[in-house]
Image (tube, rainbow, N blue to C red):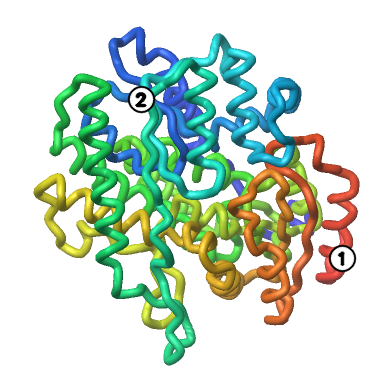
Amino acid sequence: MDSENKYPTEGFKCWKKAKELRLQYYKNYMQAKEKGGIRWAGNAPSIDAVPYGLGDDVYHLTGEPYGATVAYNKEFARRCHEVVEAKGYARDLCAYMRNYWGSVLLNEFVFGGPFPKPDFMWVLHSCCSHAKWYQEASRIEGGIPYFVIDWSAGMYYKWDEKREDYVVDPNQEHRIQYLVDQMQEGIEWLEDITGREYDDEKLIQAAKNYFESTSLWAEICTLNQAIPAPMDEKTMYSFYVFAALHKAHREVVEFYKELRDEMRDRVARGIAAIPNEKARIMTDIQPPWGFLEIYRYMESYGVVSIGSFYTFTLMGHWEIAEDGTFRPRTTPMEKGIEIRTREDALRLLADWALGLPMAQIFYDHRFKSHIMKKIFTQWKCNGIIMHFNRGCEGLTLGVAENKQALVEAGIPVAYYEGNMGDEREFELATVKEQITAFIESLGLIK
C-alpha cells in the first residue's frame, strides 16, 4: 500500500442496484402510456405521496434531478440554453428550469426519444421559480393541467434564547391547516382531471414511505461522521437523488435500508471513501454538475467532502435534539402514531413538509448558518467551500451572509462563483486555483 494511503477502501456493493433503480425510474415514466398508466411532472419537493392515491400505475418526473442530468450532458445542456434564450427567456433564470424548458422546446428527452408529455403537473411552490416553471411548461406543452400548492407558511423553527438554539415553533396549527386544505382541494382536482377514484389506503402507505425514506437518508448521512468517512460527497450525489425522484415509493425505502446497513458495515470495518483522508471539508449548495471532477481534484490532496447542507437537508428530514445535536427526524410510526384516515395522512405530511430544514432558508438565512456550524462540528470538518451559484435564485439566498457568519465563527471558508446547470458560467481552471490555495492554507500539499 502507498505510504500515503492509510485506510482501506472499496466500492459500494449497492452501486449496481442504484444505477438500475435510477434507470428504471426514467424508463417507467417514458413507457407509462404504453402500460395504460398516468404520467405527471413536478418539482422534487412536491408532496408526491398524494398522487399515489390514484393507483400503482402512476409515474412522475421531478424537474430538478432531470435538469441536473441535462447539465451533466454539457452539449445537450448548451443546446437547451440556446433554444430557451432564442425564445426570449432571461439567462439569469433557474438553470434547471431552463434545461427543462429547453428539452421540451427541442422535444428531446435526455435519455433518448421525444420528450414524454405528462398528463398533469403537481407542484409545491417552494421557491420563486417553481410555480412559474410549470405554468410556463404547461403553456409550452399545449395547456397541460397543473396544480400548485403554496408552501410559504413561514418558519417552522424559532430561536430560543435560553437554549441558544432553534426549537420547533409550537404555533403550527395555522401552517398545517393551510397545507392540508390545499392538498384536500388537490385530491378533488386529481380525481376530476384523471377520472379515477382516489384510494386513501394508497395515500397512507405512500405517506409512510415518504416519512421513512427521508428520515433514513438523514440517518445515512449521520454515519459519515466516522473517521475515515465511508462516503464522499460525489458518491453521495448518486444516492441522495432517490428521495428527490420518488421518496414516497417503497423501493426507495428498501434501497435506503440496504445503503444504511452497508454504511454501518463500512464504518465498523474502517472502510474509507478515499484511502488518503487527511482533511474533511463540507460544501453548502448544489455543485456545478458538469464539473464534478473538482471533488476528485480535492481528493488528490487527501481532502474528502463529507457532504453539505444541500445533500443532507434537501430531501433528508432532521430535528435538533435537546443536547443541540443534529439528528434524523423521528417518524410518526416510530412515535407510535397510527395513520387511519386521509385527514391523518395529510396533517402529518403537512407537518413533515413544513419542517424540512432546507425550506427554512427562504425565510431566515441565519438558520442555514447555524445548521452549517452544527454540521461542521459534528462531522469533524476542517473547512467549508461555498458555491456562489448563479443558477439557483432560491438556495443562493443569503449565501454572502452565511459566509460572513461562518468566518466570524472562526471557520476556514473559501468560495467560488459558478452555475449548477449552465457550464458557460463556470471556469474550471480558475476554480481549481481557488481550491488549491484554500487547501494549501489548511497545511496540505499534493
Instruction: Using the numbered discs, state the Cα–Cα distance from disc 1 to disc 2 in whole angstroms.
Output: 48 Å
CA neighbours of label 2 inside 10 A, class few (<14), some (14 to 19), many (20+): many
Q: Quadrant of the C terminus?
A: bottom right
Q: Quadrant of residue 375?
A: bottom right
Q: Amino acid at mark 2?
A: Tyr
Q: Could you say which disc has been placed on residue 59 in the image?
A: 2
Q: Could you say which disc has been placed on residue 440 in the image?
A: 1
**Residue 370's spot in the image, x, y percent?**
56, 74
Taking depth in this image into account, of 182 and 415 the one nearest to the observer is 182
In the picture, measured across the screen, residue 258 lies left or right of residue 103, that is: left
Q: Amino acid at mark 1?
A: Glu
> Residue at left 79%, top 52%?
417
> Residue at left 22%, top 43%?
184
Q: Quadrant of residue 92?
A: top right
Secondary structure beneath label 1: helix
Taking depth in this image into account, of 307 and 50 the one nearest to the observer is 50
- Does residue 200 sit above or below 434 in this rendering? above
> Residue at left 51%, top 41%?
130
The reply to whether residue 5 is visible in this rendering is: yes
Dots 1, 2 in contact, CB < 8 A: no
Secondary structure beneath label 2: strand
